[in-house]
Amino acid sequence: MNEREILLTAVKAADDKRAEDIVVLNMKGVSLVADYFIICHANSDKQVQAIAREMKEKVEELGHSTNRIEGFDEAKWVLVDLGDVVAHIFHRDERSYYNLERLWGDAPLENVQSELNL
């Protein structure tokens, strides 16, 4: 499974659980942490957890392991480490506070909508 397949699987999983304002940043050449960041939010703790759980399950169904999940119990900012793809799933209020899109403003947006038909 290549990084693009992991990215698309994770984004589709987030969309399936009704994540809002899904943004993908291409971090190649910007950060050594990952090639892609997925950033999205949900309106409740339960929904944040459901999105993280769905991402993990869908990626693992395709034979790729999840390196780590941080913040799951608190469900304010859950980080799902899929290797070259890192997902940041926020509770609505936390997303605007941390504003990762601005922090990583030099990273170009990656258009995955056409590949997923979202």
Image: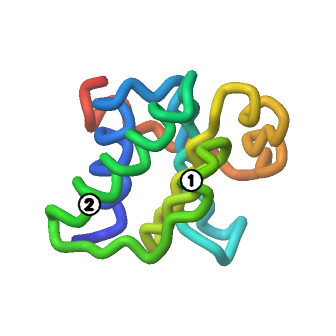
Q: Which mark is residue 73?
A: 1
Q: Residue at x 37, y 42 (%)?
A: 11
Task: Give the side of residue 7 with respect to residue 96, left or right.
Answer: left
Q: CA distance from mark 1 to mark 2?
A: 20 Å
Residue 101 percent coordinates (x, y): 73, 40
Against 66, residue 23 (above or below) is: above
Displayed quadrant of residue 12: top left
Residue 10 percent coordinates (x, y): 35, 50
Q: Which is more toward the observer, 80 or 29? A: 80
Q: Secondary structure at mark 1?
A: loop
Question: Which is closer to the viewer, label 1 or label 2?
Answer: 1
Q: Secondary structure at mark 2?
A: helix
Against 109, residue 114 (above or below) is: above
Mark 2, other Cα within 10 Å: few <14 / some 14–19 / many ≥20: many
Mark 1, other Cα within 10 Å: few <14 / some 14–19 / many ≥20: few
Task: Give the side of residue 43 with respect to residue 62, left or right.
Answer: right
Q: Residue at x 55, y 26 (%)?
A: 44
Q: Which mark is residue 59?
A: 2
